[in-house]
Image (spheres, rainbow, N blue to C red):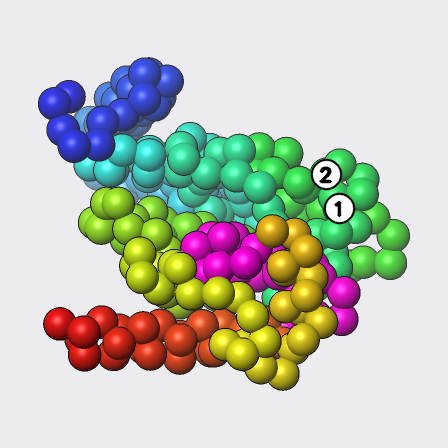
Amino acid sequence: MKTESSYDLEEINIRFKNIEEMLKQSIEKEQPKDLEENLMTQTEVPTTTNTPEHMKQEELAPSMSGEEEPGLTPVRSVTYKDSFIEIPYFLRDAFLLPQRFKLSERFLLRLNEEQQARIISELPASIDHLHEKVSRYNETHTETFFHELKDFIDEEIRRKRLIKSRPGELFLFYDGDEIVVTEKFGEKPINKENFTGAPALIDQLNEDGIVTVQDLPKELVIIGKYKSVGKGRVDNFFQQLKDLQQKSIKETIEMD
């Protein structure tokens, strides 16, 4: 328990329940095996316990290795047909920001309107029929969302581990990339001199009190909410941020 990053009490309780379930599964797996050996010895007729239904149940069951990092304990599974995604403890109530789902953004916005998928905990255990919650969407949209949800969770886990490995540092995330915001870089102004080609975006950011780099939202895709700002403009803004970061690093080296 005396670790740099410990488990929440509720997560510990979940892990104890997982251990109990692991023990139950172990006993259940051993019993059919012993019975099968006895039957084969007595009758010499082979028996099979791995029916398709049995295999499917095993495949859909969340893995419980007992070695997960704090926050990564699986708390539930979201399934689509014969596939499943494990939801880690730290994401159980995570907000499903539609802009993070490139191909499913409009689908998620419609689901949000129906209060069906604003946060992960609102997703049903099986999303096979999620598209039926809103009109003019079909099974293809649900399948696409399922794959993007997996990518979203994988990226969130990557970010969590990155932040843990570099405590005290500020990051700006965009897609699968990030920028480290040092103190000097964080003081760089958000103005039309540092960021060209999008004066309307700069004006809107400044109006909202975002006047320096350190004021930007950690999830940079959020700036796509501003008027006349599409993905291409956000891409360009992020690239200019990286260029400004390199310029800041160069200035620091020259000063030293």
* Residue span colored magenta: 210-232
Q: Secondary structure at mark 1?
A: helix
Q: What residue occupies the far bottom of the structure in this picture? A: 197
Q: Amino acid at mark 1?
A: Leu
Q: Is residue 66 left or right of residue 61?
A: left
Q: Residue at x 83, y 48 (%)?
A: 134
Q: From mark 2 to mark 1, how far is it between C-alphas?
A: 5 Å
| Residue 118 in picture, x, y percent from top left | 66, 40
| Residue 147 in picture, x, y percent from top left | 54, 60
Q: What residue occupies the far right of the structure in this picture? A: 135
Residue 102: which quarter of the image? Answer: bottom right
Residue 186 drawn above or below residue 14: below
**One can see residue 233 in this view:** yes
Query: Which mark is first along the chain, 1 or 2?
Result: 1
Instruction: From the viewer's side, name the closer residue of 44 and 52.
Output: 52
What residue is disc 1 on? 111
In the rendered image, which quarter contains the C terminus?
Answer: bottom left
| Membership of 64 in magenta stretch | no
| Residue 255 in picture, x, y percent from top left | 18, 74
How many neighbours does mark 2 have within 10 angstroms: few (below 14), some (14-19), or many (20 or more)? some
Q: Residue at x 66, y 47 (%)?
A: 128
| Membership of 224 in magenta stretch | yes
What residue is disc 2 on? 116
Q: Residue at x 53, y 66 (%)?
A: 190
Residues at circles 2 and 1 in contact by the CB criterion of under 8 Å? yes
